[in-house]
Image (spheres, rainbow, N blue to C red):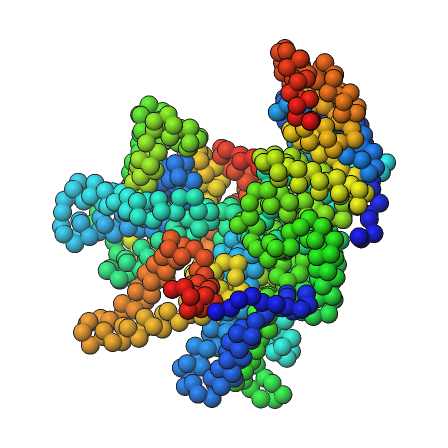
Amino acid sequence: MSDLLFFIEVSLAGLGSGALLSLTALAFVLIYKATRVINLAVGETLMMGGYFFFALAAGMSLPVWVAIPLAIAGGGLIGAIVERGIIRRMLGESPISVFMVTVGLGSVLVGLVEFIWGTDPRSLPDFMGSAPIFLGEVYVSRKIAISFVVAAVVIAIFLILFRYWRGGVALRATATDQAAAYSCGINVPGVFSLAWIIGCGTAAGAGMLLGQIGGIAPTMGAFGLSALVVVIVGGLDSVAGALIAGLFIGLVEAWTGTYLGGEYKLVFTFGILILMLMIRPYGLFGTTEIERL
Amino acid sequence: MRAPMKPASLEVAGLSLSFGGLKAINDVSFSVEPGSITALIGPNGAGKTSMFNCISGFYKPQRGAIRFDGEDVSRTHPPERARMGFARTFQNIALFRGMTVLDNIKLGRHAHMKTNIFQALAYFGTAAREEMELRAEVERDIIDFLEINHIRHMPVASLSYGLQKRVELARALAMRPRILLLDEPVAGMNREETEDMARFILDVKEEWGTTILMVEHDMGMVMDISDHVVVLNFGQVIASGLPHEVQENPQVVEAYLGSGDPAALMKRLAEEAA
Amino acid sequence: MRIATANETYLADEALLSTRTQWAWMGILALVLIAAPFVLNNYWLYLACLVAINVASATGLNILTGYTGLVSLGQGAFMAVGAYTVAWLEANVGTPFFVNLVAGGALAALVGVFVGIPSLRVKGLYLAIATIGASIILQFFFVNWSSVTGGSRGINVAPATFFGTQLTTYFQLYWLFVPIAALMVLGAANLFRTRVGRAFIAIRDRDISAEVLGIPLLRYKLLSFAISSFYAGVAGGMWAYFFRSVSPESFTIVESIFYLAAVIVGGMGSILGGVIGAAFMTLVPEILRFGVEIASPYVSNAATLLSPIRTVAFGGLIIAFLVLEPQGLAEIVQRIRRFFHLWPFKK
């Protein structure tokens, strides 16, 4: 019985970190949907969110409820600067070049963080409390539970916005056909900027949640790699895919990490990634691209 | 002139291709005589390019056979067909933009060459010999023949549309074609360029003896140079025969003009043929 | 000003160096390379060896990514395969270094073909991501297959021996690495004078029409992976003889990004580009170090800032070249050449 209890606890923790993966994957999906760019710097933007919060709440001693929105805005600002300053200038270049630009961007962000805050890991000012939560007999870490709820709420808001908000509809239209959207009077460059701002802001938010759980370090951008697996499994342009695959990968990581050992986590998730690429390259819910002569 | 490859015959029998529920080609049969020029015509969306893609192996038809000199090739992959002697050009020019004209042409010979990776790394010896033989042959038989001497070292991206089409023909000729598939060889060309291309196609037929199957919208040129015309509409053959027979076929007229005035089309065709 | 080049044979027309100026430059380069070890101090010889290793690996990646259009973020992992092979053979078999290097290359090529299999289904970004996945899985083996790789501590490598002489100084290793790298660059240049190289470029430019023109796509994509990782494997083997110890830390995803960056900065699809890109990216951190040394009297913790500055510069160079000079340093060289061809008639 206690084995089962333990399994449930592990699985709940997995779902918790899975929700964070979903949230981060959402940043990938938003940006990819609108601009067809795989932003490999999402992980580093997430890291920046954590450090922004650290600087504001610990460095400048601002109240948490001021620091959180400011840190998210900081992530959005990175998105805006990158989109206007770099990505827009590369319109029409091969997707690979743009991808590599985001790889370079990731390197720049890591370097900046190391330059300003050094390489040592740090812990964030706590705003969630640490008293554990019990669901019946099952123990859940309070921070993971709160993160799960926050991630779930944010994703739900996104789903609603996509469907009903003008900007969300514009984004879907742009994703389907840029030229047609443009000729329907949709401000396509505006949609591009918006997607980058919201996407990077989301990543920064996820960074704060992640930092609450495990602290922040210049290496935490690696979380972006797991989120990358999520978007490939779910489908690069599918919000629902990010959601489901995020929870799935979260569970897989929790199970392998607990029962096989931490070193097996990445092997398993990336094994799934390669398998997925071989079987369904466009993911569970992604749009298949057709090639023509 | 080089020793010509033996021209091949082509027979398409009961070919059907569908994408999901859409029937692009529906039970099409026709044949191409060795050494002849056969034109495949029809309104937009009639299935001509799909037919070409089946013949060169890019699409796999669900039913039917494609016989090359009597042998069914419909199960083979595109590279194998290239080695057998299928050579084609593309509707939207498919030259390799990162290469010069000369390299594009040489690429056509790929399937018939033998240099392996180790010989290629060493270059001197086998690879160099094979490359030099190819170069000499390409210069003599193709570059001079198609009058593209002046552009051989230029990157293809810098060429005019008409010249690019000619380089595509050159590349197809380098493939040692036994059947040449030309997908809209004069589309988008002006009258002068069209006449040049028509002359080259006729020259290929006469001097190389190659079998030619082409898709073309320019009726004037089709009527001028084809020996045989096959008309497709909605994925089916609606007529075939000598150019003038097809021209007078009422079904063909209707396919092109809907239920419009046949006399008007006849007049236009006659003008273009003149 | 050059008016025209008149070559009398096709062989001369297709030679790697077709003009007298090019031969002169190549002669000067050869002389410099031969004279260098007698002039340079140990530190510069160390850098020269490192450049040679990186040139070999970057040239390999250029064949795959620059010429075949298959983006790989696995070059570091392939180098690791070569390095571990050499280390293992030195420790357990004791075969001559030349055999070890070739074996390292061959094993890396085998792994490369395996990693290239997803290119059957996916290309472009998806393939790049698959190679990231493959390197992470390889990394797992390096850490956990301790009986062969020495686990996270890694293994030490005995020096290469040449007729009983141990090659330990940078001066000796220079004479080993530079000729090998030069041969590998020559091989790569030769490749693109033959049908194999043309097939690669065709796959890069338009793979589906390449297939209709007679190029078996999968075979050539895997061949490109094999050659590229062979180059990486040999480079990794040289790396093992150079640093004399191999551990999982030696080849992370950062190394893979480094080689891709070298190819981008140098110029994708240009042999010259791969060479100068690798040299440039190897030397930039040293130049930065020089700058930091100058600044150190004025900035209190200058030394600890060197690594972050390098990381920023590394990413910044990738971005700057992709945005401003996508053809890389090779294009800048070409521009200078064109200027002198027309000089003095055009400014």
Q: Which of the 4 image quadrants contains residue B192?
A: top right
* Rendered view: C143 above or below A293: below
Q: Quadrant of residue A135?
A: top left
Residue C267 in view here? yes
Q: Position of residue C231 (x, y in %)?
A: 58, 66
Say which quadrant the N terminus of chain A sits in. top left
Camera-side residue of B223 and A231: B223
Q: What's the residue at 47%, 84% (across, down)? A: C36
B268 or A173: nearer the viewer: B268
From the top left corner, tell me how far across and down residue A210 is, in percent: 31, 46
Count of all numbered marks drawn on residues in the image? 0
What is the x, y in percent for residue B99? 58, 54
Residue placed at 44% from the left, 34% from the top? A238
Residue at image position (44%, 51%) is: A97
The answer to which of A216 and A74 lies nearer the viewer is A74
Q: Is residue B10 left or right of residue C21?
A: right
> Residue drawn 24% across and 59% down?
A117
Lateral position of residue C248 relative to residue B50, left or right: left
Taking the image as shown, residue C143 lies to the left or right of residue B40, namely left
Please identify the quadrant where the C terminus of chain A is shown: top right
Establish if C67 lies above or below C154.
Answer: above
Determine the image quadrant of residue C261.
Answer: bottom left
Is residue C131 visible to us here? no
Question: Residue A192, image x and y in percent?
Answer: 34, 38
